Image (tube, rainbow, N blue to C red):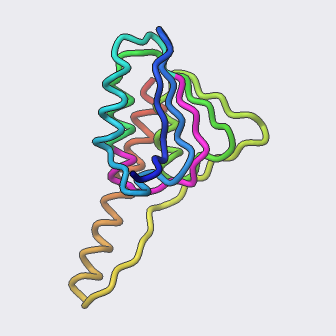
Amino acid sequence: MSKSWFTARNAGTVGEIAIYSEIGGSGVTAEAFHADLSRMRGVSTLLISINSDGGDVSTGMAIANMLQRFPARKVVRIDGLAASMASVIAMVGDEIVMPSNAMMMIHNPWGGVVGGAEQLKSFATALEVMQANIVMAYQSLLWDK
């Protein structure tokens, strides 16, 4: 079995999730995250610890959306780094704790593609859509609280 980039456990009224590697890495899907999160129904507080350099945009957006609608108080702890998609996920917190020696990195999405002009244009358009979605996520997750 693949090593997961997250762990989840339920400790009574408190649920704990740790995202400590590349989001979407090792073949672990948003579906697996959803299954573990669903087992935490009934907790009143969800502690989300992050030390991640980010990862897959669609997986990260799905996780941010799942966590946003999860019916518990969410405390996000940035233990070292919340970069790229991990920074978007961090914005779901009702409380965000970030020590002075931790870092957050926000940037525009990027990637590479091989192909002809049409594939390159299509990928550029996809990156523009991802960027707009990420900006909207920051606005709705952070400023609309």
- In this image, 121 relative to 102: left or right? left
* Residue 65: quadrant of the picture: top left
At 58% from the left edge and 39% from the top edge, which residue is drawn?
50
Residue furthest to the right in view is: 101
At which x and y percent is residue 130? 34, 58
Quarter of the picture holding the C terminus: top left
Q: Which residues are magenta?
A: 47-61
At which x and y percent is residue 111? 42, 71
- Does 2 lie within the magenta span? no
* Residue 97: quadrant of the picture: top right
At 25% from the left edge and 90% from the top edge, which residue is drawn?
116
At which x and y percent is residue 55? 46, 56
At which x and y percent is residue 9? 47, 25
Residue in front for this viewpoint, 113 or 135: 113
- Does 55 lie within the magenta span? yes
Residue furthest to the bottom in view is: 116
Residue in front for this viewpoint, 93 or 77: 77
Tag count: 0
At 54% from the left edge and 35% from the top edge, which residue is drawn?
18
